[in-house]
Structure formats: C-alpha cells, structure tokens
Amino acid sequence: MGATPHSADSKELKGSGKKRPPAAGKGRPKGAINKHTKELKEMILAALDGAGGVDYLVERANDPRTASAFLTLVGKVLPLQVSGLDAGPIATVTRIELVGLGPNGDGKN
C-alpha cells in the first residue's frame, strides 16, 4: 500500500491504512457519570424522599424482614477504600489491660 495523505488531527491505524477520528480512544473523563446512571440515581433519591427519607430507612433497618436488604445497601454506599485523617494511614490503638486474678482464679479477692 502506498502512503495516503491525512490531516494532522487524525491518526492512521497500524497496518490497516484506515484513519480514526482525532478524539478516538480518549473515552470519558475519570469520574464522569454515565447519563443513564445519573438519571437513575436521581430517580432513586426522589423515590426515597417520597417514601419518607431517613425515617423510612430507619424503619427498614429495624424490620427483621428488610434488615438484610438495608445492610446490602449500606455496603454499596460505603467507600471501598478507607483512609485515616487527612487521607493518611489508619491509626490503630492497642490496649492491654492487666486484670489480677484472686486466689480462686475468678478475679475476685
């Protein structure tokens, strides 16, 4: 195949001789929400507001028949990665408690 002229904006696909648009392969910017996902989220929040908002969720959490569904929802909205103060590491505190045992080994003197 001979060389084909092309504009500086388009790039030639290797081995095919075909050109692709200048923005091909860039995709959606990081963090951009899909249009349908955004609309669905808005509808769900509107339905929750219409059902009673926080009070409705508290009722679902306290009802044994719906508690597992509520906990599933909680698991979906919690962050996937947890970090400490100012995005630093998580601080852990270890506490060792010494308890003296009485002569009978029951902790009573």
Image (spheres, grey):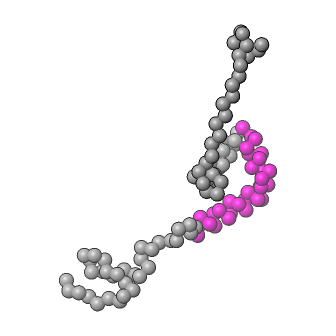
Question: Residue 4: in sight, yes or no?
Answer: yes
State yes or no: residue 36 in magenta: yes
Does residue 97 sit above or below 70 in this rendering?
above
Question: Residue 82: in sight, yes or no?
Answer: no
Q: Position of residue 89 (x, y in %)?
A: 59, 51
Question: Which is more toward the observer, 77 or 108?
Answer: 108
| For residue 24, side relative to residue 64 (left or right) | left
Question: Which is more toward the observer, 14 or 40?
Answer: 14
| For residue 41, side relative to residue 4 (left or right) | right
Residue at the spot 31% in from the left edge and 80% down from the top edge = 12
Residue at the spot 36% in from the left edge and 80% down from the top edge = 20
Of all residues shown, which one is farthest toward the top?
A: 104
Q: Position of residue 92 (x, y in %)?
A: 63, 42
Q: Position of residue 81 (x, y in %)?
A: 57, 52
Residue at the spot 65% in from the left edge and 62% down from the top edge = 41
Residue 19 is drawn in which quadrant?
bottom left
Q: Which image quarter is the N terminus in?
A: bottom left
Residue 61 is drawn in which quadrant?
top right
Q: Which image quarter is the C terminus in?
A: top right
Report the magenta stretch's main SS. Answer: helix
Q: Position of residue 40 (x, y in %)?
A: 63, 63
| For residue 55, side relative to residue 77 (left or right) | right
Does residue 39 sit above or below 13 in this rendering?
above
Total numbered circles? 0
Residue at the spot 63% in from the left edge and 46% down from the top edge = 91
Question: Which is more toward the observer, 89 or 35?
Answer: 89
State yes or no: residue 37 in magenta: yes
| For residue 33, side relative to residue 107 (left or right) | left
Residue range in magenta is 35-64
